[in-house]
Amino acid sequence: MKYAYLLIDLAVISLPLLASFGRILAFYKTWPAFIKSLIITAGFFIVWDVIFTDIGVWGFNENYLTGPGLWGLPIEELLFFLCVPYACTFTYAVFKKILVKDPLGGYAGPLTIAIMVACIAIAAFNTDRLYTFYTCAFTAVFLAWLIYSRKASSLGWFYLTYAVIILPFMITNGLLTGLEFWKYPIILDEPALVSDQIVWYNNDHNLGIRLFSIPIDDFIYSFLLQGMSVYFYDLFSNKK
């Protein structure tokens, strides 16, 4: 039980890491760009995580942790911000390699605007729910920057990456939030608990709607985490 969260982290990164040394993609050659992206993205999310853990927006079950931590976060949570961005960025790089043309064509820009407007609306109506408000607000600001900098029209590869990663995201996040997949094949208003959750959420600070056991807010949070990861990866790759 104490290695549960650590094993989930390792499962997320293991296949992308092994595949990084393949001859065709050779993703390891772009590690300098990824590391720069990771410093910015993980740094932002870790500061956010430290604050929200401290005020009780979410927390961690010590029964599923190895023990060591930093800044009030377990080491497994810190590794999460390495493993997930790595898996996402690797997948994104694969699609950029095998798909010459943007898979969404001219639809990425309008889709970005629609998501930004939806995030603004959700944030505006949930100012008292800290997780919901800040997740949607940060995402809206990030997308607004992409639109302003004329990057939104080339996000087709990222949207494809996000769509593909949704299933493994639901599996890993479901395990973290206490889901028994074989028992709860429906959308629930309350979390579907096993005996405990590895990561727990204070429902006063989220929308209170769960897909299986996963707070719906997590899908926006993951969107922002992945989006920032690939944006800065592209930025530093192009500078090189």
Image: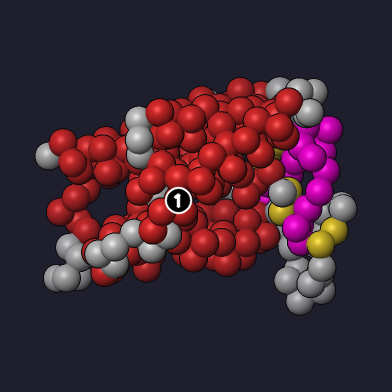
Residue type highlighted by circle 1: Ala
Position of residue 124 in the picture relative to residue 236 (left or right): right
Q: Which residue is mark 1?
A: 108
Q: Which residues are magenta?
A: 195-213
Residue located at (18% from left, 41% from top): 238
* Residue 146 is a magenta residue: no
In the figure, residue 173 lies in which quadrant? bottom right
Position of residue 233 in the picture relative to residue 171 (left or right): left
Q: Nearer the viewer, residue 87 or 125?
A: 125
Q: Secondary structure at mark 1?
A: helix
Q: Position of residue 198 (x, y in %)?
A: 68, 51
Residue located at (52% from left, 27% from top): 141
- Which quadrant: the N terminus? bottom right
Q: Position of residue 222 (x, y in %)?
A: 55, 47
- Which quadrant: the C terminus? top left
Residue located at (29% from left, 67% from top): 99
Residue located at (76% from left, 23% from top): 127
